[in-house]
Amino acid sequence: MKFTELNLAENILQAVEKAGFVEPSPIQEMTIPLALEGKDVIGQAQTGTGKTAAFGLPTLNKIDTANNVIQALVIAPTRELAVQSQEELFRFGREKGVKVRSVYGGSSIEKQIKALRSGAHIVVGTPGRLLDLIKRRALKLNTVETLILDEADEMLNMGFLEDIEAIISHVPNERQTLLFSATMPDAIKRIGVKFMKDPEHVRIAAKELTSDMVEQFYVRVKEREKFDTMTRLIDVEQPELSIVFGRTKRRVDELTRGLKLRGYRAEGIHGDLDQNKRLRVIRDFKNDNLDILVATDVAARGLDISGVTHVYNYDIPQDPESYVHRIGRTGRAGKSGQSITFVSPNEMGYLSIIENLTKKRMKGLKPATADEAFQAKKQVALKKIERDFADESIRSNFDKFKGDAVKLAAEFSPEELALYILSLTVQDPETMPEVEISRERPLPFKPSGSNHGKGSRGNNNRRGSRDRYRRDNAGNGRREFKRKSNKNFKDFDKKDNKRPHRTSSEKKNGFVIRNKGDR
Ligand code: ADP
Ligand code: MG
C-alpha cells in the first residue's frame, strides 16, 4: 500500500514524501483511515512501528490553519517523547502551516506560555505541565477537537491516570479521541470505555516482534555476582553500542557509576534527570561519544536510537512485553543484535513467561571468568597499540618525547617498557575497583510459565546439573548450553520446523521501521 491511497491532503502527502516514508506501517495503514473517518481509535503496536504518524497524519489533516486556536491535544508520558512527537508533527504539518507546540516540566514555564500565546494548533505535553498551564489559565482546551493519549501504558505506569482524567475534564465531550499504546493492560481498556465513544481497536500483534535478527541469551547468576558477570561479558563481547536496562532509577545510577569507575564510557538516563542532561546523554550516545547507555524502561521507551548492537537486561523485566520492547532496541534495520538477560535463580520462572510470549527460546550463556575478561581486554589493548603505531597522526605526536624516550631506552629493556605500557593500558582484575550494587528485591517467585512444575526450570534446584554445557568453539567463543527441552517449547519448535518461511502477514506484523540514522 502507498501513502497516496490513504486520502490524506496533498500538502500532508508532500511532507510524508519529503520525510522519505514510502509505505505506511501496518498500524498506520489500519488506523489512519479510521481516524480520518472521525472514529475513536485505540491502536496497539510495538515501539518503533510509527504510532506517531498513525495519529499525527489524520490529526494534521483535520487542522484548520485559518482558525488560530488549539484544535488538538497530545498527552505524552515524558519530555523526550513529547519533544519527539512535536518534531514529527511539525515535520508533517510544515507544508500546511500547522503550528505545533510542546510543553513539559523541567524547563521554563514562562517560555512555554509565551510560545502558546504566539499561537498553536496542536499542543503536545506531559500531564504535570499541562495541568500547571491549565491552572494558570495559560492553556485553554475548550476548542480541542482531537484528543490523543500517546504511549498510554507508560503514562499509567508512571501514575498519571488522575492527571489525565483532570486534563480530559477540560476538553469538550464532543471530540475525537485516539489512544496509542505499546501494550494494552486492562486499565487502558477501562480508559477506552470511560473516555472514548465506541472505539475501534487495532492491534498489531507483538508476538512476532522479537526479530530473528536478535540473538537472545540469558545468564543465570546470583544477584550479588551480577555486576562482575556483566562487565566480564562486556569485556569479552566488546559491544560497539549497548544499552543496559535496570529496573529502578537507583539501579541506573549505581550501574552507571560502577561502569564509569571501571573505565567504560557509560551514562544513565531516567525520569529524575533534568531535561538538558537527558538530551545531552542521548545525543552523546547517538554521536558515539558513549558506548553504554544505562536506562530504565520508561526512559528508553520510544527513543529513536539506531545502531545498538547489545542489550543487557541487568534485571529481568517483570512484564514480558517490556522485554520485547527492550530487545527491540537492537537488531534493527537489517542489522543483527544480541540481548543478554541476567536472571537470578529465583526469577527463572519469568524467563519461561517471556519465552512463551516471544515464542523463542533464549540460549543459556555461561558467565565469563575474570581471566577470560582479562585476556579479552589484553587483546583489545594489543590491537590498539598496533593500530596506533600505524596511525601517522599519533606517531607525529611522538616527537615531543624523543629525548625522554632515549633516556628511558637506555635505562630499561624494551621488554620492561612494553610491560609497563601494558600494565597501564589493561586493567588487572586484581586491582579492579570493587563495585557494590544495592540489592533490589528479586521479583516474587513465579513457577515457570508452563504451569507444570515438573521439568520446568527455576523451581528446580537440580536443573543446573542437568544442563549440558557446551563450548561453542566454532562460533564466537560463547559458552552456550543446551537445556532440557520443556514441553511447551517442543510444541512450537515443531510447528516452526514445518514452516520454513514466514507468511506474508507475519512479515507485515513484524514491520519495524528503520530509524532516521539508518537511512
Ligand atoms: P512508535 O511511536 O510506534 O514507537 P515512532 O512514531 O516514534 O514509533 O516511529 C519510529 C520511527 O519510524 C521514527 O523515526 C519515524 O519517523 C519512523 N517512521 C514512522 N512511520 C514510518 C514509515 N511509514 N516509513 C518509514 N519510517 C517511518
Ligand atoms: Mg510513540
Image (cartoon, grey):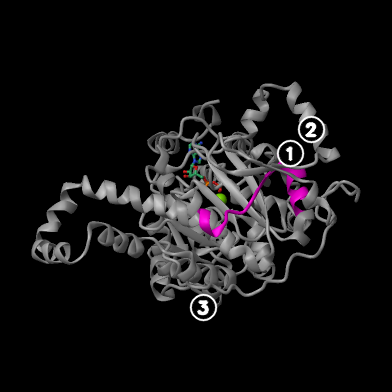
Q: Position of residue 310 (x, y in %)?
A: 52, 48
Residue at which label 2 appears: 492
Q: Nearer the viewer, mark 3 or mark 2?
A: 2
Amino acid tagged 2: Phe
Apparent side of residue 345 relative to residue 505 in the rendered image (left or right)? right
Q: Nearer the viewer, mark 3 or mark 1?
A: 1
Helix, strand or loop status at disc 2: helix
Q: Which residues are magenta?
A: 350-372
The image quadrant where one finds the C terminus is top left
| Residues at marks 3 and 2, CA–CA distance in whole angstroms | 57 Å
Apparent side of residue 336 relative to residue 467 in the rendered image (left or right)? left
The answer to which of 383 and 161 lies nearer the viewer is: 383
Q: Position of residue 452 (x, y in %)?
A: 91, 48
Amino acid tagged 3: Arg
Residue at (74, 24) in percent of width and height: 497
Helix, strand or loop status at disc 1: loop
Q: Earlier in the sequence, mark 3 or mark 2?
A: 3
Residue at which label 3 appears: 136
Q: Position of residue 75 (x, y in %)?
A: 57, 60
The answer to which of 29 and 400 lies nearer the viewer is: 400
The image quadrant where one finds the N terminus is top right
**Crowding at mark 1 (Cα within 10 Å: few <14, some 14-19, many 20+):** some
Residue at which label 1 appears: 359
Amino acid tagged 1: Lys
Cβ atoms at labels 1 and 2 below 8 Å apart: yes
Q: Is residue 126 above or below residue 372?
A: below
